[in-house]
Amino acid sequence: MVFDRDGYIWIDSGSRPTPIAISKTQAPKPRPADDELQFGTVFTDHMFLMDYTEGKGWHDPRVAPYQPFSLDPATAVLHYAQAVFDGLKAFRGSDGTVRLFRAAKHIERLNNSCERLCIPRLDPELVLQSFHSLVSLDKAWVPAKRGTALYMRPTVIAAEPFLGVRPAKTYIYFLILSPVGSYYAEGINPVRILATDTYVRAVKGGTGAAKTAGNYAASIFAAEEAKKQGYTQVLWLDAVEHKYLDEVGTMNIMVKIGDEVITPPLSGSILAGVTRDSILTLCRDWGLTVSERPISIDEVIAAAADGTLAEFWGTGTAAVVSPIGELGYKGHKIVINGGKTGPLTQKLYDAIVSIQYGEAADPHGWTTALPAARLTKTAAG
Ligand SMILES: *Cc1c(COP(=O)(O)O)cnc(C)c1O
């Protein structure tokens, strides 16, 4: 292991500690006030990096000052989008403790995405250490105000400079952190969504179940069209029949019809959302009827017509839940729950947020406090 000029190393108190070389910034940035935070616009002082070389595996885990990459113009990721990422959050509780929400589940998904994109899998323990070491070092950046959080973006990109479609022989894993504001300034606000029967997001057998860069590039056009018509998000229907609900924007979709909470099954075209899993778990804990089954847009419209369409919401790390107040489809407008946030949607939001800030019991062990780690000055320093 080569130590940087600062000569700090970070040792996790976990089961298989790997020393992580730390190079601290010489120019710490000012931190915005909690009230001024938006989403994904400001980044902390440091980043985590690790390299992969064929024959050598993942190597040189390190923390460095946040800085631009220098990439050869032929770098594979810039041409063929061999890239995966994930997104999770760290919260500062009212007791001052910083907790990560469902880190292990996000790491598992990152590795599933890697597999689909022919990117070598990461050691989950090492990825967890990247989370712990970087968040510990930039802990002062974790905002405190309720609703705010530190958004964490682990990413893997193909780093080999070559033109040609095949798996790269070198990769970069990096983690960046962004303090983010409350998604909802004054309570949770319902959005208007437009179901599209023109564009599709993903087809079974495609990459819809992976969090991979190209999926998002491919979704922008339809989202812009929806915005021009005054809608916030696109409701994606299945790619074959343009009939069954898939996802909403970059969130999973759930609908409550009568007493049944329904969400599309994980059948290959949608992402296995961690928030989706958390919400289904809570609903089952509470004794609600939960179905993971195909649900068609016709069933939603019929339920609206007969008065059983009770609530409709999206789920994702950024917002937790995003209530849907209005659905547009083929020129029709359907208003859900009078355009207001439904009681179950609100209850789910409150329950998850209380666990995230360490205010409620966490029976499923979803949150993990940062471990007591050691930042040590080495002899090499
Ligand atoms: C990230 C994402 C989600 C939500 O996943 P969470 O783990 O709940 O944040 C849903 N759909 C898509 C397409 C996504 O990219």
Image: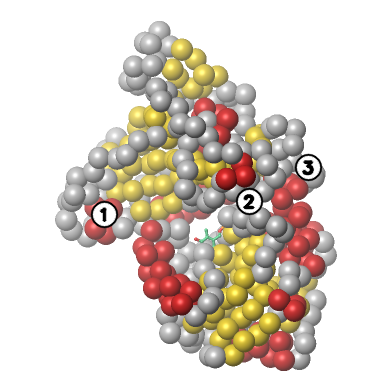
**Can residue 169 be seen from the camera position used here?**
no
Q: Secondary structure at mark 1?
A: helix
Q: Give the foreground label among 2 and 1.
A: 2
Q: Residue drawn 29% across and 35% down?
A: 56
Q: Residues within 10 Å of mark 1 (few under 14, many from 20)?
A: some
Considering only order in the chain, which callout, 1 or 3, is on the residue closer to the N terminus?
1
- Whether residue 349 is situated above or below residue 260 in the rendered picture: above
Q: Quadrant of ligand 1?
A: bottom right
Task: Tell me where residue 87 appears, x and y as whole percent.
Answer: 51, 50
Q: Which of the pair 67/89 is nearer the observer?
A: 67
Task: Tell me where residue 319 appears, x and y as whole percent.
Answer: 62, 57
Q: Give the foreground label among 2 and 3.
A: 2
What amino acid type is highlighted by mark number 1? Leu
- Residue identifier under label 2: 182
Task: Tell me where residue 158 appears, x and y as whole percent.
Answer: 29, 49
How much space separates mark 3 and mark 1, taking CA atoms? 43 Å
The quarter of the displayed image where residue 278 is located: bottom right
Q: Is mark 1 within 8 Å of ligand 1?
A: no
What amino acid type is highlighted by mark number 2? Ser
**Can residue 4 be seen from the camera position used here?**
yes
How much space separates mark 2 and mark 3, taking CA atoms? 17 Å
Considering only order in the chain, which callout, 3 or 2, is on the residue closer to the N terminus?
2
Instruction: Classify residue 104 as left or right of residue 313.
Output: left
Q: Secondary structure at mark 3?
A: loop
Q: Residues within 10 Å of mark 3 (few under 14, many from 20)?
A: few
Q: Quadrant of the N terminus?
A: top left
- Residue identifier under label 3: 359
- Residue identifier under label 1: 78
Q: Residues within 10 Å of mark 2 (few under 14, many from 20)?
A: many
